[in-house]
Amino acid sequence: NAGVTQTPKFRILKIGQSMTLQCTQDMNHNYMYWYRQDPGMGLKLIYYSVGAGITDKGEVPNGYNVSRSTTEDFPLRLELAAPSQTSVYFCASSPSTGPYEQYFGPGTRLTVT
Amino acid sequence: KNQVEQSPQSLIILEGKNCTLQCNYTVSPFSNLRWYKQDTGRGPVSLTIMTFSENTKSNGRYTATLDADTKQSSLHITASQLSDSASYICVVSKANDYKLSFGAGTTVTVRA
């Protein structure tokens, strides 16, 4: 049982470049989330989705975009990378009923220089 | 201001010793409180989840307590092992909301 998988594990981008962080879950969860984790800070919600075709902004959505064409996949797009987007990114999924237990992927460490 | 505050920021303990981590929150209305363990380079993994009616819950050598009146929780690690070295994150959710509020975590280092 793979759970939540993320690719790539590491990436270095130059300022202004674009990339997509991939996230896939095999637990048939309707809810999926993208977080970023900065040193000394709690995880911050970037975007979330409650089902295929439905997405919404979290606390820190600027500079990111998402899409949800299937239940399994929830990619995160960075269009014009900036140094402030250097962070570790986590994807998570949860059932659509309480207590909405979230299962996290292994993370993607992104550096923008 | 973060709605979930954890202390201490980090601590070092000797293998076999006990330790207690603290979490204070202001999230309201409260639904449940979770403790996650995050190993270096990994995603967080759930240890315990407690609703307002539960004041203690154990998972092996991990025991979490909750005082919903004072909005405080603690995580006690008994007879620590080297594998307990990790960041422990307190997470609180609002009633009828699937979004979570995360503390910054306490980094525990267990030394032989």
Image (cartoon, grey):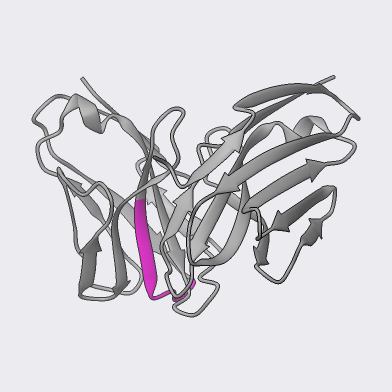
The magenta segment: A27-34
Kindly tell me whether residue A4 is visible in this rendering: yes
Splitting the image into 4 quarters, where does residue A86 fall? top left
Q: Which x, y percent locates residue A90?
A: 40, 47
Instruction: Report whether A75 appears left or right of A95.
Output: left
B25 relative to A29, above or below? above
Q: Which x, y percent locates residue B106?
A: 61, 33
Splitting the image into 4 quarters, where does residue B18 fall? top right
B97 relative to B1, above or below? below
Instruction: Report whether A101 appears left or right of B55.
Output: left
- Front residue of B37/B53: it is B53
Q: Quadrant of the N terminus of chain A?
A: bottom right
Instruction: Give me the residue at 59% from left, 65% from top.
Output: B32
Q: Name the residue furthest bottom.
A: A97
- Front residue of B35/A9: it is B35
Q: Which x, y percent locates residue A46?
A: 28, 51
Is A32 within the magenta? yes
How many labels, in total? 0
Kindly tell me whether residue A13 is visible in this rendering: no
A26 relative to B111, above or below? below
Q: Quadrant of the C terminus of chain A?
A: top left
Instruction: Report whether B88 appears left or right of A70.
Output: right
Is A30 within the magenta? yes
Instruction: Give me the residue at 41% from left, 62% from top.
Output: B99
Q: Which x, y percent locates residue B24?
A: 59, 45
Instruction: Give me the residue at 81% from left, 41% from top.
Output: B77
